[in-house]
Image: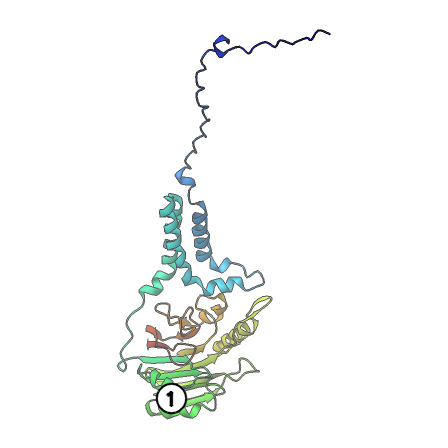
Amino acid sequence: MTAITAVLPEPRAEADQPPQAPQSPRPPRRRRAAPAERPRPRRRRGLVPAALGLLTALALGGHRLVPDLGLGLGRLWESALPWSGLTVPAVLLCAALRRAPTAACAGGVLAAVWAVVFGPLLLSGGAPGAPGGQGLTVVTHNVNAANHDPAGTARALLAAGPDLVALEEVTDAALPAYRSVLDRALPHYARTGTVALWSRYPVTESRRLIIDPGWNRSLRAEVQAPGGPLAVYVAHLASVRTTLAGFATAHRDRDIAALAEALDGEPLRRVLLLGDLNTASGDRSLAPLTERLRPAATGFGFSWPAALPLVRIDHILTREVSATDTWTLPATPSDHRPVAARLTG
């Protein structure tokens, strides 16, 4: 049998292959440029701080219209009114950082409203009057029932050279210490329950003032002061309580109404009210009293809490006598600061 040998074709050399055209490099694929962000118009910048400034200005100028909403929010806002001024630098700072003229204008509006509301109060201030001379210097202080140094507190109050000193939260245990100091300079004295009055001038009459039958912490006294008889009321009203339903003010408001009714029956022309009223000067709840008496206030005179006073709840109010100066005294062991005023008339 004849062998069959398969002859395979030899591979062609590379030179035998047809030449390939050189390939030109592909140009890099261009990415489509993102559309440029259009700058926001300046008038639309800072809308949030502008809205905050304008809303604060409206709430400040029309604070009587801010509703309580069943939680006492309107009254709480009125207690914090002076601090609304802190919104001004915050809005103006945002306006500067965002270069937002709208926010800057809103900050200016808020600053103007704040100045209108509180400017007269601040511009009426002056240096505390010197002891003695014409007029009366009066001091009121909630000394705190837990005061551990009543004698030292009394000495601090006498440093103001007062003619009248009204104290609240005077306990039976602390009374001898207060009297041992105050009686030397102010020999005329009246007390009922936890409120007391010391006077440089004769106290011809004093009695408990019943504005809250459950508590004995208000009195009325008649003082033979320079210029004629002076009816002096000392009162410690109920506190505001925080509950799940909001801020409970009903008890205090009843005390205010009862005190206003007592003032309507006051026969003397010259009247002075001293005490811890547990409400701020701007609180609408104080209206029954401020409609009958004039608050003695030059400056804010924050009195509580003593360590960092945020609000004035200790007050001096007058009728037919005027306050030329009011000021707060240095802190004592109490959680309130003493409040003083110089009166004429």
Residue at position x 44%, y 56% in the image: 61
Residue at position x 53%, y 62% in the image: 73
Q: Please name the amino acid that badge 1 sits on.
A: Ala
Q: Quadrant of residue 305?
A: bottom left
- The relative height of residue 252 versus residue 83 in the rendered view (above or below) is below
- The relative height of residue 51 versus residue 318 in the rendered view (above or below) is above
In the image: residue 321, left or right of residue 286: left
Residue that sits furthest to the front in the current view: 1
In-front residue for pair 316/4: 4
* Residue 18 visible here: no
- The relative height of residue 38 versus residue 128 in the rendered view (above or below) is above
Residue at position x 54%, y 83% in the image: 215
Relative image position of residue 74 (x, y in whole percent): 51, 62
In-front residue for pair 75/342: 75
Residue at position x 28%, y 76% in the image: 129
Relative image position of residue 30 (x, y in whole percent): 45, 24
Pointer 1 local density, CA inside 10 Å: few below 14, some 14–19, many at least 20: some
Relative image position of residue 312 (x, y in whole percent): 42, 71
- The relative height of residue 327 versus residue 40 in the rendered view (above or below) is below
Q: Quadrant of residue 181?
A: bottom left
In the image: residue 79, left or right of residue 187: right
Residue for badge 1: 151
- Name the secondary structure under disc 1: helix
Colour convention: rainbow
In the image: residue 312, left or right of residue 68: left
Q: Quadrant of the N terminus?
A: top right
Q: Quadrant of the C terminus?
A: bottom left
